[in-house]
Amino acid sequence: MKSVEDYVKTIPDFPEPGIMFRDVTSVVEDPDGFKLAIDGLDELIGDAEFDIFVGTESRGFIFGAPLAYKRGKGLALVRKKGKLPRETVSCDYDLEYGSATIELHKDTIKPGQKVILVDDLIATGGTIAAAAKLVEELGGEVVKIIFLMELEGLNGREKLSKYDVESVIKYPGK
């Protein structure tokens, strides 16, 4: 029987020499791989009590939507600046080469709501740390953060040390 790791294609030296790119599209393109990914993420949730998922653009949407459906919960979307139509809160954060801004609808998280953040990959942790900050700014409580894959060599967990963070697959390098 295959595991979800068997569906991840690794592309050496992309986008630059020395990087081992872990391609999530090869997982979701295959129905068995996609099912294993969703089931693996769902197992990470366990019996956590929560009200809503928050997925980050764009692959957090891919994994957050089936999890929300499976668990009977809603899915709030964290998007790049200027993509959401209603009033938003925003957070600037640093990328490896520059900075970015993400936004969340101001009325999507209610004070006291318990939230699970979901994304495909944790690398440096900047995007998901910014998303957690937005949730907390709106009065929500981040009860768990889940990822399909983790690049342990980039130390993204350090930015998320105050949260319960889990990943289905862990790669020791970058």
Image (cartoon, helix red, strand yellow):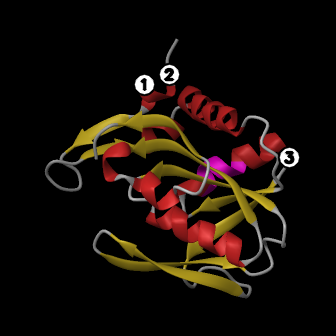
x, y percentage for residue 147?
A: 54, 46
Distance of mark 1 from mark 2, alpha carbons?
Answer: 5 Å
Residue bounds of the magenta highlight: 61-65
Distance of mark 3 from mark 1, alpha carbons?
Answer: 29 Å
Amino acid bearing label 2: Ser
Q: Would you call the spot at circle 2 few (<14 residues within 10 Å), some (14-19), or many (20 or more)?
A: few
Identified at 44% across, 28% down, the residue is 5
What label does residue 72 carry, if any? 3
Identified at 57% across, 26% down, the residue is 32
> Is mark 3 in CB contact (under 8 Å) with mark 1?
no
> Is mark 1 in CB contact (under 8 Å) with mark 2?
yes
Residue for badge 1: 6
What label does residue 15 carry, if any? none
x, y percentage for residue 51?
A: 83, 55
Q: Would you call the spot at circle 3 few (<14 residues within 10 Å), some (14-19), or many (20 or more)?
A: few
Using the image, determine if residue 117 lies above or below residue 24: below
